[in-house]
Structures are given as C-alpha cells and as structure tokens.
Image (cartoon, helix red, strand yellow):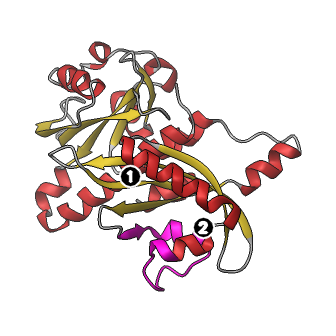
Amino acid sequence: DKAVEQACEAGYWRVDREMNVAGSAGLFRILGLDPQGPQLSLAALRELVAADDLDGALAEVKAACAARRTVKLDVRVRRADGEMRRLRIVGSPSLDALGRLSAMQGVASDRSEERAGAAGGAGRESDLETLRRALDALPAMAVLFGPDGRAQLASAEFLRRTGLTAEGIAGSALPDLQRWIPASWRSGLERSLRGESVVGTREPAAFGAADAALLRWRSAPWRDADGAIAGVLLSAEDLTEAARDADGETERRERLAMGLAMTGSLILDHDVE
C-alpha cells in the first residue's frame, strides 16, 4: 500500500513458489529502478546484490523457506545509478490451505543513513513511532496486541472513533475494549495467538449511535525472528463505502492485504516485544 510505503519509507516485495517476483513502486525507488521499466526477476536482483553478500543472503532465504520461518538480513546493493546502499530485507512465509509454502513476502528499506547516523551519534527515531505511522497509514483501523493479549499500539483512526488515547489503550486487554470491538473477537484473538488468521463478516460498528458504519474485522498473528508467534494485529475495514461501490472492493482488499503484510514485516524489522 502506497500510504504505508510512504509513511515508513519501505518497499513491498513478493516471490511466489514459481519464483515470480512482484515489487511495489517503493521497492523500485529504493533500488533506483523505473517502476515503468522491465519486470523484476530473481536474476536481475542477484545482479544488484554485492558479490560478498550474495551467497550468505541466498543461504539465509533458502533456510527460511525450508523452515517456514521469517527472514531478516542486511545486504549491500548497487543501485541502477551505481550508488552502493545497505538494505534491510524482512519477510515471512505465506502458506496455502494445505500448509504449503505459496510465497515469501515482506519489505525492503534503505538503512544506509542509519549506519551513518549511528556513527555520528545521531539516534534513529523510535521503533514504536515507525510502527505507529504504519498503523495510521493502513486503509483500516488497527490495534497491535502483544503475546499476552494486551494492546501495545492503536492507529489514530481507532483512537479517534473510540475516544481513547494512546496512553489509555496501552496495556488494555480485549475485554477492556469490547465496548468497541465485538465480543466474538475474544475467540478470534485467541485463535490468532495460536497461529490462525481470522476474517469476519460484515458487522455494524459499535462506536455510538451516530456511527452507522459496516465493518469487517480480521486478526492475524505476527512472528518474531525465530518464527514464534509474538502477538496479533487486529484490524477493522470500513465497508460502508464498499457497500455502495462494489466495483472497487477488489482493489480495496488488495490494498489492505498488502498494507497488513507490510506492517507485519515492519513489526519484525523493529523487534517489537
């Protein structure tokens, strides 16, 4: 999703089981490539990675695919304009209904300035602030829960519609939020903490009589660098406009799916605990 990319200066990538590569405009920008140019391929990407980093990166990605776990690595890349940059690559597996690996997807971000800043004593913005921007940019309301089932962060839109504050929601358990979140999502959260992604049906919003929105709630686990479930990202897509504009629903779903995938990878990238 472009909004998440711009908020966090990251690019989305996906490689399916046939080794087809897809990349967002943000990824092309990071690599110094023209988004209107030739389609990305694994061969073209190998040409960009520094020779000293290539073998180690390929071995790590293969190991992650074999173990169905997340991958997180730094590589040096020579952009199309000849400039060498250091990129952080983060990704996680997508499984089909039979539990088979269908793709790896995630984000890439340019960390060259981070290293230079660290050498000069300048600190990088807080990881939580980066994730807060990602949640705010999602085309849905969102709440990030930790492994104990307590809220860590919420998007600005969720806070606006509930009247809560960032400080007030931190540490809240799902029962504390069930004035606004359907009671059925207690089981949804528990299922996601066991590793399941859950998508609900259309339900009326519970933000007050003046809010007549139709929402679709969904929850998905996020994982740490070892692949263990470390929490749940709960989101609510506003379907009020979708009910009036069915033609745009596919595009909205694709935007949300990409935005959630990117946010999950950013959580891993920034080591949220």
Circle number at residue 123 = none
* Segment colored magenta: 20-43
- Mark pair 2, 1: CA separation: 18 Å
Residue 80, by quadrant, is bottom right
In the rendered image, residue 205 lying in the magenta stretch gets the answer no
Q: Position of residue 49 (x, y in %)?
A: 63, 67
Please tell me which residue is depicted at 35% across the width and 67% down the height of the picture: 19
Q: Amino acid at mark 2?
A: Ile
Nearer-the-camera pick, 233 or 57: 57
In the rendered image, residue 28 lying in the magenta stretch gets the answer yes
Would you say 83 lies left or right of 193 here? right
Above/below status of 32 relative to 233 = below
Instruction: Say whether residue 136 is visible.
Output: no
Please tell me whether mark 1 sits on a helix, a strand or a loop. helix
Circle number at residue 30 = 2
Classify 10 Å Cα crowding around label 1: few (below 14), some (14-19), many (20 and above). Answer: many
Residue 9, by quadrant, is bottom right
Would you say 121 lies left or right of 160 here? right
Instruction: Say whether residue 61 is visible.
Output: yes
Q: Quadrant of the N terminus?
A: bottom left
Please tell me whether mark 2 sits on a helix, a strand or a loop. helix
Q: Amino acid at mark 1?
A: Gly
